[in-house]
Amino acid sequence: MENKTTHTILLIWTHLCRFVLAGLFLFSGFVKAVDPPGFTYKIQDYLAAFGVAGWFPFFFPLFVAIFVSAIEFCIGVFLFFGIRKHLSVTLALLLMLFMTPFTLYLAIANPVSDCGCFGDAWILTNWQTFWKNVCLLIAAVTLFRWRKLMVRFISRKSEWLVSMYTLIFIFFLSFYCLRYLPILDFRPYRIGTDIRQAMAIPEGARPAVVETVFILEKEGKRQEFTLENYPYADSSWQFVDRKDVVLEKGYEPPIHDFSLTETQTGEDITDLVLTDPGYSFLLVVHRVERADDSRIDLINEIYDYSLEHGYGFYALTSSPDEEIESWRDRTGAEYLFCRVDDITLKTIIRANPGLLLIRDGVILRKWSNARIPDEYVLHDKLENLELGQLEVPRDASTIGKVFFWFVIPLLLVLVADFFFIKRRDSGKEEDTYHINPLITNKMRKNIVAGNWKMNKTLQEGIELATSLNEALAGETPKCDVVICTPFIHLASVTPVVDAEKIGVGAENCADKEAGAYTGEVSAAMVASTGARYVILGHSERRAYYGETVEILREKVKLALANGLTPIFCIGEVLEEREAGKQNEVVFGQLASVYSLSPEDFSKIVLAYEPVWAIGTGKTATSAQAQEIHAYIRSTIAEKYGQEIADTTSILYGGSCNASNAAELFANPDVDGGLIGGASLKVADFKAIIDAF
Ligand code: PEP
């Protein structure tokens, strides 16, 4: 009972971890995919902060941005649906193992102001990010350890559909937002923003003291200037960059860095532009040297259109003068250039170039380079066009569209999977629906096998087998039933049982093929009785008859060669358990079967039988059994791969009886039992079979 409760708590905890991780990975991948340039800038910040920006090709940050968001989103979806468990859980763990110490370093050293893990949608401080990651790491470790408990919502047959659709969706979203601007804008320069209002400091609030610093260069020497000592008179200083330095912290309005300085006169025209009651176009080219000039004709046309109708047109950049000149030469640009902080420009619009339409300081529209309006759209004065009106952002409708294009198709797959695949395959073990992993999460057989040992005369044995056969007549056991009898019973017992329902096996076979081995019974002889199984490596045979790893290796080979299924027993003695060496011991014993080919290995059944529990009335606790069964399965996975590990039945043996069987079999890695004493009475044995 206690173990059952522990198991239920573990199940709930694992699923809590699963959904929290899934939710956060989904959110984090989605908000990054919505804004690939934003995450690209963040990666560039990281590379610059670590002084390695020059090590990578220019496309590297964007590539990483798109790739990471896709991975995060896929992990989220896979965890949510419980598909590709090994991959998603391992990736989640690896990511958290990297991110947790990394964000600790960020929190201590502060090389970047925020880690950017949720894009601009949810900005956390570096310490908040670190603590969040500690929680997620705990969740990832939990999930990695107990991933088998994860309930699967969709069958294996349909999981590829979910995986493919998720990948296509997330890449499409990233490329769409990269080309046409983020579909959700979390930054302070959203459409509809009144820039002046967003810059205002509420009455009584103490503003931060910020100083603009200009970095200029002359004869290869760089120097920083403020507005006070700016060398206006000396034109030989070339502009390189500008930055805002916070001298004193205070209230920071949503927009605090919007300032336009005319490049030729050095005049601050921020107020002039923001208070203009007419329309103004702001062409944002944050670095002209890297801007896409493929649609420059359209931009020049809009400039002409602005002149014609008396609208403002300003190009905003952070590039130095010579780059602006080169842009003018290249594109024939005649418009006015204003210098603006680079980060501000990247925040205003995620395109280079990108275009804004403002009136009276309010952002009315934004266009990426790919969507710059042409003469057909601008066929009249803005006052007469819908384009000249505020385009109210409709986040709810955008989220609705995302829901429609992502969630609805997946729901349809889920429903189709439930009604067509699951129903069609119900009853087929290999595609069992994993609604309750404790009971049904099996791609392997559940088996209850009896080991009669040296009990029962021939007549008693026939009677026992006959009675068991009768007890199971008209029933469909939820597991395979096997009885392993002394050699002399085999030929007489096989004909009295229904072979469809009860398999018969021997308790041993010789390690030699045939010949002068007085008293031995070969695997071929066992098979000739109609028996299909053979117990090998039982602890009593290891202890009393000196069966070694090598002898057992031969027996297993001969059993398989004669078409028998070995039920191969392993287990530690009490002293070994007390010394905590059980894993080591069973691993050593498995050497007899770990030399088999994958094909042969997949034909055997394992039985973990702690020697201290055999015939003693002491049982391993459910948790002890699960723990070592999971360990055994993990060694199979290492040796033969996950698929074979998942399909190998591992039985528990050792004082298993009617009252403890259900609890033991409820463990995800316990696939039935090898039953000694309790297999000698039909009622007891049947009750154990019924535990499934
Ligand atoms: C056995 O000998 O395989 C065994 C499990 O015995 P018991 O169930 O009697 O402990």
Image (tube, rainbow, N blue to C red):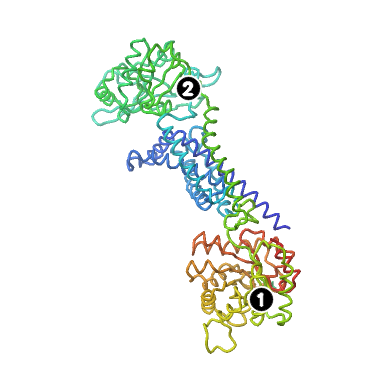
Q: Which of marks 1 and 2 is nearer the N terminus?
A: 2
Closer to the observer: label 1 or label 2? 1
In which quadrant will I find the C terminus? bottom right
Residue 308 vertical placement versus 351 (above, below)? above
Q: Mark 1 points at which residue?
A: 495
Q: Can see residue 613? A: no
Which residue appears at 62% of the width and 66% of the height?
651
Image check: 310 left or right of 183? left
The three-letter code of the residue at mark 2 reads Ile
Ligand 1 within 8 Å, label 1 CB:
no
Q: Residue 403 carries which label?
A: none
Q: Position of residue 28 (x, y in %)?
A: 51, 39
Image check: 476 left or right of 40? right
For label 1, the SS is helix
Res. 304 image quadrant: top left
For label 2, the SS is loop
Q: Mark 2 points at which residue?
A: 191
The three-letter code of the residue at mark 1 reads Pro
